[in-house]
């Protein structure tokens, strides 16, 4: 897993002759920063980055909120067919996202949301994974705490934000981080719904760069790829232990 990432970073600071040298030259004689400068000069990389930040922040934020509200309802609110609703959510985890691409595209095109943030964000707001993970965590919470908050006059809103959310913070953070990584790296749907460069996210912009440079300018492509991968890779590495703790928090009982 590490080897391709290292090769990407090394190639991004090589000149073109060093990349195509035979036998293989592992390290550059001198780090070359021209590939990164060429990416910024030739492409609206700032716009690509802004698009990814907007899509990731808004999409991930709404997904986490929806997961929290749905999980709370499934655990703490009585309503008919609650188990059936949960089964439907579990079934949704088994449906490949490619299956809904055509219906989503037809709907978004009819609404006129092509090449818009709404068109990129809205179809992916359903979050079965986050709902499932948070529901399992909420089931482990002591009911005495919830009952005490109810006796103190706390409604559903206060119970969620003042009692349940603080206790479940590691799991909520895990859902948020996994969702952020997924939104940042999403490729298929933005590629389909966007065809204007000014609305492309970073993963789709790499395809634009590859189409323009072909296979002759790997240094620039590797520099662009590094600029896409490094931000989320750094965040994931720094918070990895919190992700593991959140994923295992609801896995034990006692």
Image: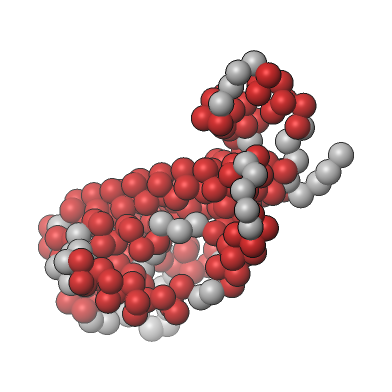
Q: Position of residue 142 (x, y in %)?
A: 77, 32
The residue positioned farthest toward the right in the image shown: 254
Answer with left or right where residue 231 lies relative to residue 111. Answer: right
Q: Residue at x 41, y 75 (%)?
A: 100
Front residue of this view, candidates 88 and 176: 88
Colour mapping:
secondary structure
Answer with left or right where residue 81 lies relative to residue 248. Answer: left
- The reply to whether residue 70 is in sight is yes
Q: Residue at x 41, y 44 (%)?
A: 61
Front residue of this view, candidates 60 and 87: 87
Q: Position of residue 167 (x, y in %)?
A: 65, 30
- Residue 179 in the image: above or below residue 104: above
- Residue 205 in the image: above or below residue 72: below
Front residue of this view, candidates 30 and 76: 76
Q: Quadrant of residue 12?
A: bottom left
| Image quarter in which the C terminus is found | top right
- The reply to whether residue 206 is in sight is no
Q: How many marks are shown on the rendered structure?
A: 0
The residue positioned farthest toward the top in the image shown: 152
| Image quarter in which the N terminus is found | bottom right
Q: Position of residue 129 (x, y in %)?
A: 57, 58
Q: Residue at x 42, y 82 (%)?
A: 23
Q: Position of residue 7 (x, y in %)?
A: 44, 67
- Residue 160 in the image: above or below residue 7: above
Q: Residue at x 37, y 51 (%)?
A: 59
């Amino acid at each position: 897993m590490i080897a391709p990432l290292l090769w990407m970073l090394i190639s991004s600071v090589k000149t073109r002759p060093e990349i195509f040298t035979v036998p293989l030259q592992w390290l550059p004689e001198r780090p070359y920063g021209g590939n990164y400068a060429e990416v910024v000069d030739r492409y609206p990389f700032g716009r690509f980055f802004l698009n990814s930040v907007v899509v990731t922040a808004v999409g991930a934020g709404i997904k986490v909120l929806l997961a929290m509200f749905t999980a709370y309802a499934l655990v703490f609110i009585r309503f008919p067919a609650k188990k059936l609703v949960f089964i439907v959510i579990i079934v949704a985890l088994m449906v490949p996202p490619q299956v809904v691409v055509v219906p989503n595209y037809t709907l978004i095109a009819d609404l006129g949301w092509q090449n818009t943030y709404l068109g990129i964000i809205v179809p992916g707001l359903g979050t079965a994974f986050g709902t499932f993970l948070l529901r399992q965590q909420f089931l482990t919470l002591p009911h005495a705490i919830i009952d005490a908050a109810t006796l103190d006059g706390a409604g559903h809103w206060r119970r969620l934000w003042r009692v349940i959310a603080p206790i479940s913070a590691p799991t909520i953070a895990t859902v948020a981080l996994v969702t952020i990584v997924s939104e940042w790296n999403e490729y298929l749907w933005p590629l389909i719904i966007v065809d204007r460069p000014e609305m492309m996210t970073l993963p789709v912009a790499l395809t634009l760069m590859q189409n323009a440079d072909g296979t002759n300018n790997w240094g620039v492509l590797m520099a662009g790829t590094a600029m896409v991968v490094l931000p989320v890779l750094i965040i994931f590495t720094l918070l990895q232990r919190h992700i593991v703790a959140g994923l295992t928090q609801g896995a034990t009982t006692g």
